[in-house]
Amino acid sequence: MNLKDLINSAKDADVDVTKAPSFEEFKPKVGENYLVKVENVKGIVSKAGNPGLNFLLRIVDGPDGINQTIFESVYFTESMGPNLLARNLHYASLLGVDVDDIGTFDFPAEPGAKNGEDFPFTDTVAGLEPGYRKDKQDPTKEWSNHHYVAAASGPTTTVTSDDGDDDLGWDD
């Protein structure tokens, strides 16, 4: 079936869209170990104006969620203190970023912009040990507090520009 026929069949289907499955982000389970492959990295700026990196990670090995994707963001600011800043730089390095590039990267000017610019990274596989923490202002919200570790990987390739694909779900 071609795409046009597929779209037309969906238009003609008698489906109760209120019962359609909703998108739920895959949440790796605490206590399990996963391998993730870095698919893309974007330079971003938080609403508070802090530069950071947003990683699109694909689960490549683990007890469940193979081929699922997760997002991870790390920020860099003096106010977080030296320990958290060092941890975020360490994680960025484990996830294929040359930390020297962070200081020279032209981050987006608009704070809180959802989409950043492509950030150069090395094709990398890393270990993921999931963790979560409660939001301090809203205890019903949970934020990822994952731990990343070095993992053996195959040959690496440095990615420095857009390859023209759809960026695996990133808005362009």
Image: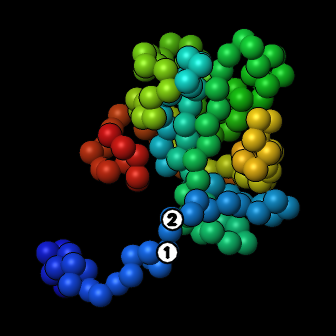
Q: Residue at x 67, y 60 (%)?
A: 27
Q: Name the residue under label 1.
A: 21
Q: Is the residue under label 1 in contact with that under label 2 (CB below 8 Å)? A: yes
Q: Which residue is drawn at 55% across and 57% down?
A: 69
Q: Which residue is drawn at 45% across and 35% down?
A: 114
* In-front residue for pair 165/171: 171
Identify the amino acid type marked 1: Pro
Q: Is residue 59 above or below residue 85?
A: below
What colour scheme was applied to this rendering of the protein? rainbow
In screen coordinates, is 3 left or right of 127? Answer: left
Q: Residues within 10 Å of mark 1 (few under 14, many from 20)?
A: few
Q: Is residue 71 above or below residue 35?
A: above
- Assign the N terminus to one quadrant of the image: bottom left
Identify the amino acid type marked 2: Phe
- Assign the C terminus to one quadrant of the image: top left
Q: Residue at x 75, y 14 (%)?
A: 79
Expressed as whole percent of the image width and height from the top left, the position of residue 134 reads 80, 44
Expressed as whole percent of the image width and height from the top left, the position of residue 161 reads 35, 34
Expressed as whole percent of the image width and height from the top left, the position of residue 112 reads 50, 26
* In-front residue for pair 66/143: 143
Q: How crowded is mark 2: few (under 14 residues within 10 Å), some or many (20 or more)?
A: few
Assign a secondary structure to mark 2.
loop
In screen coordinates, is 53 left or right of 152? Answer: left
Q: Is residue 95 above or below residue 19?
A: above
Expressed as whole percent of the image width and height from the top left, the position of residue 128 reads 73, 52
- Residue 152 visible: yes
Question: Residue most toward the left?
Answer: 4
Q: Mark 2 points at which residue?
A: 23
> Residue 89: which quarter of the image?
top right
- Residue 6 visible: no
